[in-house]
Amino acid sequence: MTSFDPERVFAALQAAKVDYVTVGGIALIAHGVVRATLDVDLVANPAGENPGRLAVALCALDAHPWGEPETAVTQELLGRDANMRFETSAGQVDVLAATVYRRLFADLRRRAVAVRLGDVEIVVASRADLIRLKAGTGRERDLLDIGDLLALEE
């Protein structure tokens, strides 16, 4: 199993100039929730050159689609209407690329906040957007995360 190193993931995204918003555990932690996580969840801008930049960043991390280690990470793969999990040399990266997330990207990005993670600046979903995203899943873990976010003072 690969050691989880989110700073390396975000450094690769930064180096490739990927436009993204982080959601999930890393975003929760950035907003002050005490939470363990072993992956990076992100929504990437689906427009223009960004899918190609994301492919470059993932390749720099030796990414392989989960369950399909022989499949190359390409702009075409990332253009699929699907959420994808990648195993990388820095841990798991989940790219939320289903149509619903593609449609939400511009609004998520407009309201996102920048925070530091070690030596890199990362972009995380706003507190309100995290609550909306998590409410939409109905999963027990996400409902607990909403409670934690609501318990924090704004």
Image (cartoon, rainbow, N blue to C red):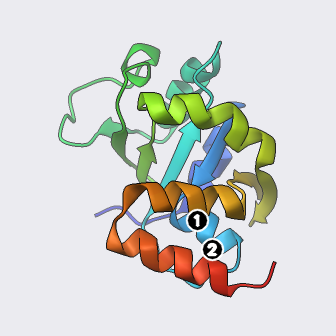
Where residue 104 sits: x, y (%)?
Answer: 60, 36
Q: Residue at x 41, y 39 (%)?
A: 62
Q: Residue at x 25, y 25 (%)?
A: 71
Image quadrant holding the C terminus, namely bottom right
Q: Say if residue 15 shows up in the picture.
A: no
Q: How crowded is the residue under tag 2: few (<14 C-alpha within 10 Å), some, or many (20+)?
A: some
Residue 113 horizontal side relative to residue 52, left or right = right
Where residue 61 sits: x, y (%)?
Answer: 48, 42
Q: Tag 1's secondary structure?
A: helix
- Quadrant assignment, res 15: top right
Residues 46 and 129: in front is 129
Q: Determine the CA span between mark 1 and mark 2.
A: 5 Å
Q: Is residue 86 above or below residue 59?
A: below
Q: Tag 2's secondary structure?
A: helix
Q: Residue at x 45, y 79 (%)?
A: 144
Residue 5 horizontal side relative to residue 64, left or right = right
- Quadrant assignment, res 114: bottom right
Q: Is residue 27 above or below residue 154?
A: above
Image quadrant holding the N terminus, namely bottom left
Q: Amino acid at mark 1?
A: Ile
Tell me whether circle 1 and circle 2 mark residues in contact (CB < 8 Å). Answer: yes
Q: Residue at x 43, y 69 (%)?
A: 142
Q: Amino acid at mark 2?
A: Ile
Q: Which residue is mark 1?
A: 26
Where residue 94 sits: x, y (%)?
Answer: 42, 47
Residues 30 and 58: in front is 30
Where residue 23 sits: x, y (%)?
Answer: 57, 55
Residue 29's disc is 2
Q: Is residue 147 above or below residue 101?
A: below
Q: Say if residue 42 shows up in the picture.
A: yes
Residue 82 horizontal side relative to residue 58, left or right = left
